[in-house]
Amino acid sequence: MDIETKIDLICRSPTEEVLTMNDLRNLLETEEHPIAYNGYEPSGLVHLGTGVICAYKMKDFVQAGIRFKAYLSTWHAWLNNKLGGDLELIRRAADLFKHSWIALGVPKEKIQYIYSDELYNDVNYWAKTILIAKNLTIARARRTLEIAGRKETEAKHVSDFLYTPMQVADIFHMNVTICQLGMDQRKANVVARELGNKLGFWKPVCVHHSYLQGLVKPAIWPIPKEREREIISLAKMSKSKPETCVFIYDSPEEIKRKIVKAFCPERTVEFNPILEICRYIIFRERKTFTINRSAKYGGTIEFQSFQELETKYKHGDLHPQDLKIAVAEELDQILEPTRRYFENNREARECLTTVKNAEKTR
């Protein structure tokens, strides 16, 4: 495969940013099969963002001939006190994540799944962590707390400041040359780029993808321009806030209920979670998107691109309710194979049941 085709796959939506394109090109010119990774905090059920969006990028990278490591960061979830700090339960959630991506069509033979326990038995890993910590100020570490889903003022324990040095150490200990994570993990990856050469490692390429906005109205609306990044970061789809999510295991009824009640301001295309689902998921899966309406409201309408849909919606030619119903129907069809996988795979079904029950009793 030629380099331009590889770059097209790596940069394919929902990729939002590459640090930097020159570095990526140079890497692909010198390494035929570089190593990429994404790290996941297995702390509950898998929603559209962690599931579908991340699965898309795994498939893109595999198709581009990149060796992809899916890093299941059980200890980061433990540090973050997810699932009540029950490490065994967190490991079951990690198993659930793995099954979820396989159910979404990620080729399991092409992905190397790594649990953090495998790294942390090696004293050399901890040497890297300490080396990075020695070169990271408290102030800088505090500014990276976003990667753990925290505000800068929310650090209460020394362990909160271990999160970033450990995440950066993960990169170098796994010989990763491409960090492929969500935009919310950008600050840790930038630390890795800044410290890599200085500490005798390398400067990894960073490929960041968009994360999905949650289904509920942001805490502040309209969003002030100067607080855009802050508000949207807090409004992202989060498994710890089930009302913001469509989970990949949801029934057709659950999907419809959540989508129909979702925030979807009329004629507004920015920060609209339903349009985001159209952009990043439906038009990834479909060449055309059909919305069935009664003749009274304009009849059936078909869109060939997201840009076409966005324009119609912005001009008021499409009502939010009609859009929502069509999106719910499409998501139901897209997720049907995933539901079937969990129905037919006993181990996957047991993992799902365990994590669901734990969520209910938290």
Image (spheres, rainbow, N blue to C red):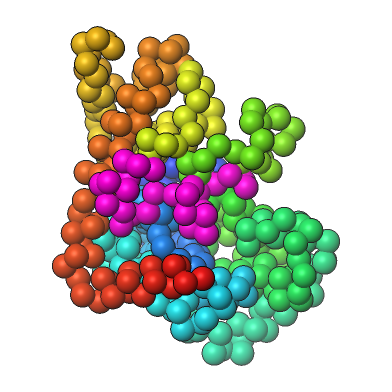
Q: Residue at x 28, y 63 (%)?
A: 102
* 257 part of magenta stretch: yes
Q: Viewed as shown, does residue 283 lie left or right of 152?
A: left
Residue 326, position as x, y percentages in the image: 28, 31
Q: Viewed as shown, does residue 55 lie left or right of 121?
A: left
- Which span is picked out in magenta? 233-258
Q: Residue at x 50, y 44 (%)?
A: 214
Q: Residue at x 51, y 82 (%)?
A: 87
Q: Residue at x 55, y 37 (%)?
A: 217
In the picture shown, does residue 7 fall above or below 118? above
Residue 64, position as x, y percentages in the image: 34, 52
Whether residue 72 is visible, yes or no, is: no
Whether residue 136 is visible, yes or no, is: yes
In the picture shown, does residue 228 fall above or below 32? above
Say which of 278 and 5 sits in front.
Answer: 278
Judged from this view, the residue extending furthest toward the left is 344
Say which of 6 and 356 sits in front.
Answer: 356
Judged from this view, the residue extending furthest toward the front is 361
Q: Quadrant for residue 302, please give it.
A: top left
User: How many marks are shown on the rendered structure?
Assistant: 0
Residue 89, position as x, y percentages in the image: 45, 79
